[in-house]
Amino acid sequence: ELWETMFKNLRDFVTREGHCLVPKGYQDGVLARWVRTQRHQYNLLKKEKPSSMTNERIVALEGIGFTWSASAAAAAATSRAPTAGTV
């Protein structure tokens, strides 16, 4: 299934990079678009609208550290980044 393949690609990305913030241009943007779609489907589900997101997918994504808000994840990553001159 396509979802399983893309999930594996994201899991591999997380293993290499340590986070789920896939840059827009990564691998021609395919994985980044998929990640954005997962966030969108999750938001639809939370609003009780038709969605392809399932509880099983939520558990799988959260199991690899997926963050449902890209802006919150980016802010957290920035706050963890070392500043110039620190050791």
Image (cartoon, rainbow, N blue to C red):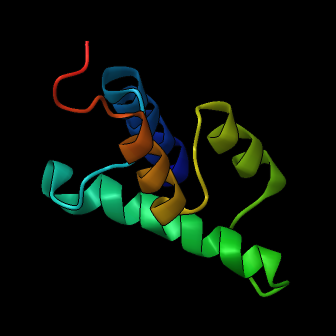
In the image, residue 3 sits, relative to residue 43, either above or below, namely above
In the image, residue 56 sits, relative to residue 28, either above or below, namely above
Of residue 84 and residue 22, the one placed in the foreground of this image is 84
Q: Position of residue 42 (x, y in %)?
A: 68, 68
Q: Is residue 49 left or right of residue 62?
A: right
Of residue 71 and residue 57, the one placed in the foreground of this image is 71
Q: Residue at x 78, y 46 (%)?
A: 56
* Visible residue check, residue 37: yes
Of residue 51 and residue 74, the one placed in the foreground of this image is 74
Q: Residue at x 58, y 50 (%)?
A: 67
Q: Residue at x 18, y 50 (%)?
A: 26
Q: Residue at x 54, y 43 (%)?
A: 4
Q: Is residue 18 left or right of residue 50?
A: left
In the image, residue 82 sits, relative to residue 60, either above or below, namely above
Q: Position of residue 5 (x, y in %)?
A: 45, 42
* Quadrant location of the C terminus in the rendered image: top left
Q: Position of residue 57 (x, y in %)?
A: 70, 49
